[in-house]
Each structure stands twice: as structure tokens, then as C-alpha cells.
Image: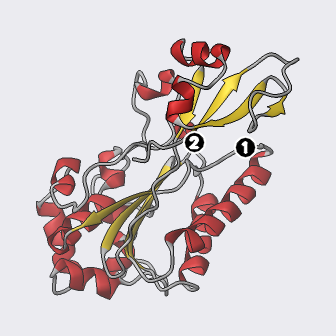
Amino acid sequence: MRTDSITARISVSAKTKRVGPHFRRRGKMGLVLFSLSELRTSAPRRIRSQCRTALVEVHMPRKPRSIEPGTTYHLISRFVAKEWFIESPEERRVYLSLLGLALKETDWRCFSYAVMSNHVHQGVVAGEQPLADWIRPMHASFAEWINQRRERIGAVFVRGPNLIALRPDGVGRLISYIHCNPVRAGLVGRPRDSEWTSHRAYLGLVPQPSWLDVELGLDLAGLADAQALDRWIEATRVERADLEAARTTPPGRPGRPTSPKMRNPPEQKAGFSS
């Protein structure tokens, strides 16, 4: 992590117009740029005091994602504050429609998905195009649609999806984990009974979307056909720890923190999984 400079958002008096050469007044909040050494020595005494009394929020720039084309990734997109933004078949259909349109314009390939009430899973193989180039506009379109539908204003997605790289031997576990989300949430008894995932498309129970690469998923999982996948999933339930063992990257930081009351809900609603 770079430590040569930080951006500190500091509470200041409304009468203060300037604190150093980089200060710009924003009501009662100022944006001040200091090096770490300046914060310890050259910054005004009031600011140093505020630093010591924890009145400063330090925002370090995010490290760019390192994505390897051809690598299998598990994408997890979460809604803010674990809110249920997808509660109806229409909302799920709109999300998948936008996802399909986005995938048709990129070289990323999707072989599995689960659209839950408060988050979305995707199994993908990375392409050359940056992830943000196709998923950010798609999520922005869905957020605009859902906000109009619910007459609300504000963010819908936690910033950026969680991106987890997996070894080749972990693809079967990934598909099983994604397809069993509704089972873990207590919604259905078997993956084939849920319309929230791509499992029924694998089995031919519903039409396969043109953007869903079932053949790629089976090939990467080392399975002969969808029936073999179904039998394996029924016989071997994959938990999060099993999937974590197949990742090639260490666990990263979680997304935007939720309110304390949401971190440990008193009871788990049907439809909530991970």
C-alpha cells in the first residue's frame, strides 16, 4: 500500500476558507492533501489535533484489479445494506436481460449464475476487456430501472463486484456453490427446483440463453454432460470453505460496510444466502 500521501476529509469551521494550498471549502467539510510527514509536522496544529482525536477519515486510493484473461472468476455483486432489490420474476428477468446484452458486447464468458434477492453470483472466464467496461454500465442501467420502479434515489450496488480467481480444479465446485444458493437459503430442496439460477438451463428444463455458455462450464468442470453435473451436485454439496480452498487469491477486503443492525440480523429471511 502506498503511504507517500493521503487524502484526509477533515471537519472544519464554516468560517475557515483555506487551510494550506490544497484546501477547498465544502460547507463544513474540507478536502486537504498532505504527505504523511506533513501531517506529523507541517499541518496546522488544529488538524494534527483532529488527526489524534480520530476526526479524520483517511481514504487511500484503491489498488487496480489484476485480472488475467482466460482465468476463471467468481463474481459476487451485492446490493447496498443487503437490501432486497430483486423480489419478483420481472426484476430477475430484467437483470438477466441486461446481463445478456452486456455479455454480447464483451469477450468475457459466463457459464453460471444465481440471481438472489440481495446479491448476484456469476461464474465467468475473463477476457481482454476490463471488467468495469461491461459490468458498470449494466449495473447502472439496472440501478436506474429499479430506482424508477420503486420511486427511490440512491445507490443500488455496493461499489464493484467481489472478484475471486479460482484454480481449474475448482470450477465444478463453483458451479455447485452457485446453483445451490437457493437450497442454502431454504427456498427449494434441490437446485433443479429453482428458477433463480442457471441449473435448469443446464438440464434443458428451460431454454438456454445465448450468452450462457453451458458447454464451457461442463468442459471446465470436467463433466461429460449436464446430467452428470446434476448427479454430482446432488451427491456433493459444496460449502463456502470448500470453495475458498480452490481460490488462487487471498481473501480481500469486504465491500461497503453495512449498518450494525444488518451485520448480525436476528433471524435469517428466506432468500438470503451468500
Residue 106 appears anywhere in the view: yes
Helix or strand or loop: what does disc 1 sit on?
Answer: loop
**Depicted 80 relative to depicted 131: above or below:** above
Structural distance between the alpha carbons of marks 1 and 2 = 10 Å
Q: How far across and down, in percent of the image, does residue 101 sit?
A: 61, 80
Asked whether the beta carbons under mark 1 and mark 2 sit within 8 Å of each other, the answer is yes
Disc 2 crowd, CA 10 A, few/some/many (<14, 14-19, 20+)? many
Identified by mark 1, the residue type is Gly
Mark 1, residue position: 154
Q: Nearer the viewer, residue 127 or 103?
A: 127
Disc 1 crowd, CA 10 A, few/some/many (<14, 14-19, 20+)? few
Helix or strand or loop: what does disc 2 sit on?
Answer: helix
Q: Residue 104's quadrant in the figure?
A: bottom right
**Depicted 100 relative to depicted 268: above or below:** below
Q: Residue at x 20, y 64 (%)?
A: 173
Q: Nearer the viewer, residue 29 or 199?
A: 29
**Residue 80, numbered label:** 2
Q: Is residue 98 left or right of residue 154?
A: left
Q: Residue 22's quadrant in the figure?
A: top right
Q: How far across and down, in percent of the image, does residue 167 sit?
A: 19, 69
